[in-house]
Amino acid sequence: MDRLHTLESMRSVIQNALPNVTVESIESLPSCCLLRFFDVKISDGRTLVLSLPPPPTMRLLRSERDLSISETLVTKWLLGEVLESPVQLKGSVGRSIDTRQHFESQLQKDEPSISPERPLLSKKDVIKFLPILVADSSSSIELGSPYNLFEQPKGVPVSDLRPPLTKYEMRSIDLQLGQLVRLLSGFKSPNGLFGSVAAVTNPPTPFTDLDGGRLVAFTSRGTTSWRQAFHGLLEAVLRDAEDMAVTFSYEPIRGYFSRLGYVLDGVTTARLVILDATDESNILLSRSTKPHESGDKIPQLTPCEERGQSRTEAEESTRERNQEGDEGGEPPSSQRPSINVAGFRDWSNCGFADPLFAEVFSRDPSSDFLRGFRGTNASDGESDGEDIIEDHENVHIRLLLYECYHATVGVVKTFYRPGPNSSEREIAARRRLAAALKRLQEVDEEEAAGKRSRRPSANMEAWPVKKPKGDNDGPAA
């Protein structure tokens, strides 16, 4: 149990928020996130999740100081966006503990459940993955801190799955994560501003950090410029590093942004980004022993379809594999269990930004993830819906700037929160940073010489650009 928050104080808070039920048990959940989570079993048979901020003794980066309010605001805002669709729900549900069933049943009346023929394109689809906020407080007297109480989708972390994931299941999960990240990117900033969810959806609050607050445009207030928002984030983590006297390539990082940051002006639409959405520790999964049941949350494509073959070719190849068994000892597709992404444990690390700012795009995303993200039809290789990536010509430079930022954060975190594997994590992050800086130097030199970058990054080579109609070549992967 959390040493800073006793069982009785948690029970008291929950009981006050939900006076019509009894708290039966509270159990701490293992988590690699900064927020702390607790399973709460209540008398009507449901299990809720209590979310608490990091302990006050934990050192946080400037960008990590509003996690609880960010979690509150993003889940409230997303639910509000879903309910602004043609479906209209009557009555207040502020403290109802059956809100998930209520919302899902109403939305299912308006539109059939997701099927392989209908990819994730509607805002209403996000309700399947969204934790429903049951109660929250920005300052609880009993706990002495903010808290959020959620009814989460039914799912478990990857580490809790038994048996472990198969190769086929991992490919399916990558595809689904790509679709879900694309779905979330379809939610645009309510006022067109870039910045943290707290800055964009909530009135600004006075700075308490007089030393570094002015630099954090992303976390302090929204801005109409993605370049300005990103600069605020980059400068904030560099100030974090300076505060801890971290030995770093400060001037090269600032110099490359100063000379190449103009490419960020090509991003004009602020979209919702969950930065760590694809981290294994943050993903919740559900597995059914019944393959391809009608309630699957996301279409399950066969490997042949994922490679872009026509449905007829895919069906023929699938029949052949079902007779011989899949490569690597996989069972025939008709005997495979259904694996679905149920949602995320932690929604707090988010903001309105360029969709490519998500960490997954700096970590060589798989072809399955990219296929899901671009929303490609397996039958014709064409993309469904709008092209949410802007300024394709400069994507590779943007990705290098983002990788520079993410690697810098990775290094600085090891100084703020050292642990058993800090040295290994620091070395890996520094290598990533060095590689990004080297490639930025190449781009910078070509720009100075009046040439365009001759060779895009590895991510760009696999980037899911929209395929022109009439082009019969296989999709880029």
Image (cartoon, grey):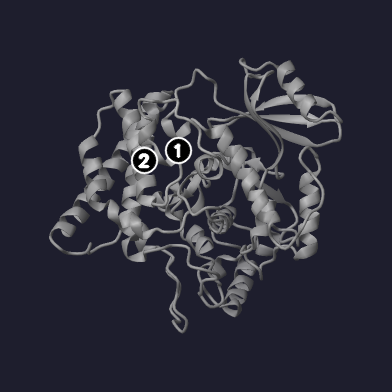
Residue located beneath label 2 in the image: 232
Q: Is residue 466 left or right of residue 179?
A: left
Numbered tag placed on residue 219 in the rendering: 1
Q: Quadrant of the C terminus?
A: bottom left
> As displayed, is residue 334 above or below residue 24?
below
Q: Are marks 1 and 2 in contact (CB under 8 Å)?
A: yes
From this viewpoint, is residue 145 visible?
Answer: yes
State which tag comes first along the sequence, 1 or 2: 1
Image point 68% across, 48% down: which residue?
286
Image point 60% across, 41% down: which residue?
73
Q: Amino acid at mark 2?
A: Gly
Image point 38% across, 52% down: which residue?
225
**Can you name the residue that lies furthest to the left here?**
449
Q: Amino acid at mark 1?
A: Thr
Q: Badge 2: how crowded within 10 Å, few (<14), some, or many (20+)?
A: many
Total marks placed: 2
Distance from Cα at disc 1 to Cα at disc 2: 8 Å
**Residue 458 in the image, given as x and y percentages of width and height:** 33, 58
Image point 75% across, 26% down: which residue?
14
**Residue 400 in the image, given as x and y percentages of width and height:** 31, 51
Which element type, helix, strand or loop, lies under badge 2?
helix
Which element type, helix, strand or loop, lies under badge 1?
helix
Q: Quadrant of the N terminus?
A: top right
**Residue 224 in the image, given as x and y percentages of width and height:** 42, 52
Numbered tag placed on residue 363 in the rendering: none
> As displayed, is residue 29 above or below residue 394?
above
Q: Badge 1: how crowded within 10 Å, few (<14), some, or many (20+)?
A: many
User: Which corner quadrant of the image does residue 177 belong to?
Assistant: bottom right
> As displayed, is residue 194 above or below residue 300?
above
**Residue 376 in the image, given as x and y percentages of width and height:** 53, 69
**Can you name the residue that lies furthest to the bottom here?**
470
